[in-house]
Image: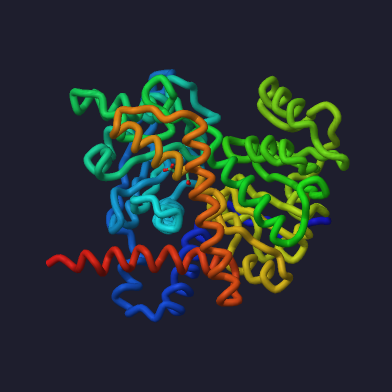
Amino acid sequence: MRIPRQGSAVDRRGGALDAARDQLAEAVRTLGYEPGLHDMLARSRRELVVSVPLRRDGGEVEVLTGYRVQHNFSRGPAKGGTRFHPDVTLDEVRALAMWMTWKCALLDVPYGGAKGGVTIDPRNYSPAELERVTRRYTSEISPIIGPDRDIPAPDVGTDERTMAWMMDTFSVAAGHTVPGVVTGKPLSIGGSLGRAGSTSRGVALLALAALERIGVRPGTCTAAVQGYGKVGAGVVDELCAAGVRVRAVADQYGAVHHDRGLDPVALAAHVRDTGSVVGCPGTEPLAGQDLLTLDVDLLVPAAIEGVLHAGNASAVRARVVVEGANGPTTTEADRLLEDRGVLVVPDILANAGGVVVSYFEWVQANQAYRWSVEQVQQRLAERMVQAWREVSADAERRGTTLRRSATLLAVRRVAEAHTARGLYP
Ligand code: GLU
């Protein structure tokens, strides 16, 4: 099936903040909060825009733009990822920071929300250039980050190597090693066992819980996963291990499918060798946008914002959508999916596994004590299941969507913390 309109980069970026603000406004209306409290929750507490001058390998200088937005810290230090992507804007970072606040509150992790990013396409830069960008960006935002202030982590376009450079840059300036300043670090410098696969693990866990709720057993379930990066690749592996037939996957270069189910091992090997899922032996090519409307039970958008929009949401045939990415569904698409009875497990719940294990990593750094992978995975599962139960019970009681209930529960926790602390002066 053809998709009438694909959201452009500009639509996506503007749309993320619109979607985040719409979700908050709806929760505030239900909770009956005053306009002043709504305004507090709708705005970022702090926004920093920085120039990041980079000396390219050829010697010329290019000036990039970086951001760090701290949306809220009523419940604890700010927390959130660092994105390196060509579409990064202040509005996008604002939306992502707000979602981090709700995500941390919903999972009862003692943090507020933040996000950062640099407008850059990392594919066009050498590792040495990316190291210089990361170090200069870290240095520029260092006045507002720190283990008690704001703790960055990986996001789209960044990874554990980026976090090692950030930790080192911050530590060199401090004059001593500060392992708690970032999470998602390599194990050798205080990373947590189980952090790397934690977002995917949480997404798969909640996908299976949602399927169970509508009476679909993993062995009879088919799925499509959009995105084969840090989140999507792990989701494919976890779902296949549970017996789900993953019929299609897409990455930024294209998509592949196989009606009887893809072989996760062959897929991972092909991506390791070629850098893309495209051309994986034993699969057929598929237009990337067609993956979203494939005839499957479960759809996992695990790439970027705004991919389900007014132009394609009515064509989605999955019965369950589990948001591995942040903000993959626009407000209009959300309504269309709701009207058609599609069960949407929202991002702030579905993909919270990453920040939960980030929190465990920070606790371990503060304690200077390492937990076993079993402890990490068990505690992650407990928190995800607890949040799933709270959100689904609330949604059932109110007769509403999981997204409305998740946002409402999170907003209420943040508002309670804000009210308990009172307004200074
Ligand atoms: N970037 C991830 C997210 O959007 C992880 C954030 C973190 O661990 O702080 O949830």
Residue that appears at 68% across and 35% down: 237
Q: Is residue 244 visible?
A: yes
Q: Residue 16 in the image: x percent, y percent?
A: 51, 59
Q: Which of the pair 188/249 is nearer the observer?
A: 188
Task: Please state, as top left, top right, bottom left or bottom right, where the N terminus lies in the image.
Answer: bottom right
Q: Is residue 4 visible?
A: no
Residue that appears at 57% across and 75% down: 397
Q: Is residue 416 left or right of residue 264?
A: left
Q: Which of the pair 374/18 is nearer the observer?
A: 374
Q: Is residue 355 left or right of residue 276?
A: left
Above or below 251: residue 418: below
Task: Please state, as top left, top right, bottom left or bottom right, where the C terminus lies in the image.
Answer: bottom left
Q: Is residue 306 left or right of residue 247?
A: left
Q: Residue 380 in the image: x percent, y percent?
A: 50, 43
Residue that appears at 32% across and 57% down: 72
Number of marks in picture:
0
Above or below 338: residue 125: above
Most distant residue in the left direction: 425
Q: Residue 37 in the image: x percent, y percent?
A: 31, 73
Q: How is the image coloured?
A: rainbow
Above or below 282: residue 402: below
Residue that appears at 35% across and 73% down: 38
Q: Is residue 83 left or right of residue 281?
A: left
